[in-house]
Image (cartoon, coloured by chain):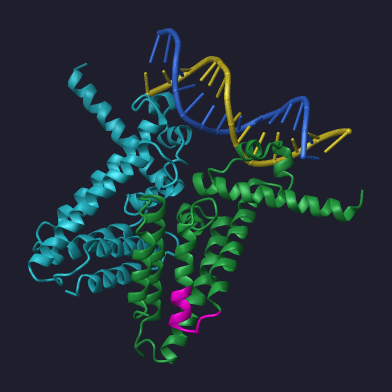
Chain colours: A green, B cyan, C blue, D yellow
Amino acid sequence: MSPRKSVAETAATRDRIIGSALALASAEGLEGLTIGRLAADLAMSKAGVIGHFGSKEALQLAVLDAAVERFTLRVPTRAVGARPGTERLARAYDEWIAYMAEGEGHGGCFLTSVATEFDGRPGPVRDAVLAALGTWTAYVKAELDTGIGAGELPEDTDVDQLAFELGGVVLAAGQSVKLHRDPQAPDRARRAVARLLGAP
Amino acid sequence: MSPRKSVAETAATRDRIIGSALALASAEGLEGLTIGRLAADLAMSKAGVIGHFGSKEALQLAVLDAAVERFTLRVPTRAVGARPGTERLARAYDEWIAYMAEGEGHGGCFLTSVATEFDGRPGPVRDAVLAALGTWTAYVKAELDTGIGAGELPEDTDVDQLAFELGGVVLAAGQSVKLHRDPQAPDRARRAVARLLGAP
DNA sequence: CCTACCGATCGGTAGG
DNA sequence: CCTACCGATCGGTAGG
């Protein structure tokens, strides 16, 4: 009867929904995600599911938000112990690559997939994808600048070009993991990153 | 009344359907493609559209097939004039990058997008994507081998690693073009390819 | 969080 | 290639 418990339970249910939605969207895409199938997976009614969000688009944004949060906790957070510059960046990419290889439904490949899925669909979801990607790119460029300042990279390094190529490596890693299920994908991606950043 | 004309007209209608479907699928994805919307775009009935293929999956396969055919005519075919090895390969990638930059609805980015869309959806479409990608990878590796034999690349070049990294560049190019609409994307991608292949 | 329901659209078929 | 139609499912709402 206490409102506290009720609020906590509501939040827990919401988390359960998000978790199932992330797994479903990892397989079928964020647009392929349907409220009916999500409800069936959770043994809930459709109204019970959508009531937490209001609309499918709001659900999609919530799922994307949760995926970004997991990514942030998993990838850059684990790299804070490494020395700023190329060392920290290599560590962050290694974490990302390992996260992707851990399997689907956990969100490892989700962000790269949803970026492709919504690249031709203007709207709030695409905007949120662009915002998340912008945050990551800013992080990468800042570490590259630090690396240049520390003499780890040549003075005339083209930071935008290097960020572009690093982005290509994680996209290739995602495709290798999800489409080809190549067990060598993480190793290949790590070597590509190491070479771009001047080897460890 | 002649059967010839009737057959030709049927084929022309089929081509019109495929063309519209490719444009629609470039924006909404191959799964987001619906028979109803396609019929509306073509000012036809749904039955008139689907009658040419039999099912949505068969339509998807036909669209993918047409995209692969356009790609083959546009990319490797235009590179046959270049010297076998790294020169021809660089030319082929340049053609692909240019094709992507030409705009959407023509299929330039379509193949990389559909590879991501179906990486978690087992079935005939995914199988067809894998087959098309396999053909391309075989082509790339053959040219790399030629390049090694001609001394354009080091003897100990890891062909699989290089093919992986080249794949990353086109994925990054696709994302830059479709998601970021970055006019510098083609130039960045070409530079990345040139560096991987030992500069021209 | 449920039942019960809404109009719209889905892929696809019958029959011509 | 059309009209007319099928059952299923879509996102979402009313009311409790």
- Asked whether residue A186 appears in the rendered view, the answer is yes
Point out the image quarter for the C terminus of chain B: bottom left
Asked if residue C3 is positioned above or below residue B25 in the image, the reply reads above
State the residue at coordinates (45%, 55%): A116
In magenta stretch: residue A87: yes
Q: Residue A200, image x and y in percent?
A: 37, 80
Q: Is residue B166 left or right of residue A9?
A: left
Q: Name the image quarter holding the N terminus of chain B.
A: top left
| Residue A11 magenta-highlighted | no
Residue A80 picture location, percent across and down: 56, 78
Judge by depth and name the residue closer to the eye, A106 or A171. Answer: A106
Give the answer, above or below, for where A83 lies relative to A181: below
Q: Which residues are magenta?
A: A81-91
Q: Is residue D4 above or below residue B134?
A: above
Answer left or right for A153 relative to A130: left
Q: Is residue B184 visible?
A: no
User: Is A43 rendered above or below residue B145?
Assistant: above
**Residue at the image position 40 percent from the left and 80 percent from the top:** A159
Q: Quadrant of the rendered structure where residue B2 is?
A: top left
List x then y, in percent, for residue A95: 49, 68
Image position, residue A156 (x, y; %): 34, 88
Res B90 quadrant in image: bottom left
